[in-house]
Image (tube, rainbow, N blue to C red):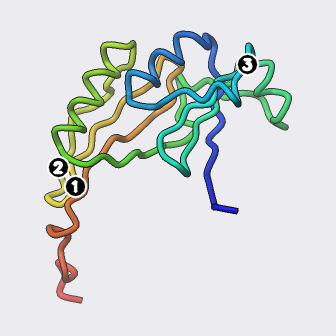
Amino acid sequence: MVKQIFINLAVTDLQRSLDFYLALGFTHNPQFSDDTGNCMVWSDSIFVMLLNHEKFASFATKPIADTKSAVAGLFSLSVESTEEVDRVMENGLKAGGIEPNEMRDYGFMQQRTIEDPDGHTWEIFYMDLSKVPTENPEGN
């Protein structure tokens, strides 16, 4: 079996969340979706399960975090170019996301942050491996 990752997120409004993730560039997999959750596909091995609170709670052993006021995790998605970073972000902002801070440029990587309508935090980034420093700046 191919190794895959399924990120499960508690959401308050399934349709609003579906629309947001479609705007980011995810596709919807109806085979693993119903009236309690939507399976969103980023790639052949990366999936996000958007689950209403009741469904999410059925899997959890702790209370659901309030991701509007606290960070529960940082999820990062790579894209093919800085232009795609901007396109994904603009689509996500139009679909109800918020950008809590400015773009960060590390020379070899450009990164922008977006929060979905429930406050889940995503880092959208492009990394140019040809620009990764080859030696430690301290000379080690």
Snapshot quadrant of residue 104: top left
In terms of image quadrants, where is residue 82? top left
Q: Residue at x 58, y 41 (%)?
A: 47
Dot 2: what SS? strand
Q: Residues within 10 Å of mark 3 (few under 14, many from 20)?
A: few
**Left or right: 10, with 136 as reference point:** right
Q: Are marks 1 and 3 in contact (CB under 8 Å)?
A: no
Distance (Cα) linking label 1 and label 2: 6 Å
Q: What residue did someone put label 2 on? A: 105
Compared with 134, 33 (above or below) is above
Residue 71 to residue 17: above or below: below
Residue under numbered circle 3? 34
Which callout, 1 or 3, points at the residue further toward the start of the chain? 3
Which comes sooner in the sequence, label 2 or label 3?
A: 3
Task: Classify the position of the C terminus by image quarter.
Answer: bottom left
- Front residue of 23/136: it is 23
Query: Circle 1 sits on which residue?
Result: 109
Residue 118 numbered tag = none
Tell me how far mark 2 sits from mark 3, CA to CA: 40 Å
Identity, as a three-letter code, of the amino acid under mark 3: Asp
Q: Quadrant of the N terminus?
A: bottom right
Amino acid under label 2? Asp
Give the amino acid type for the residue marked by disc 1 in the picture: Met
Residue 61 pos. (x, y %): 84, 37
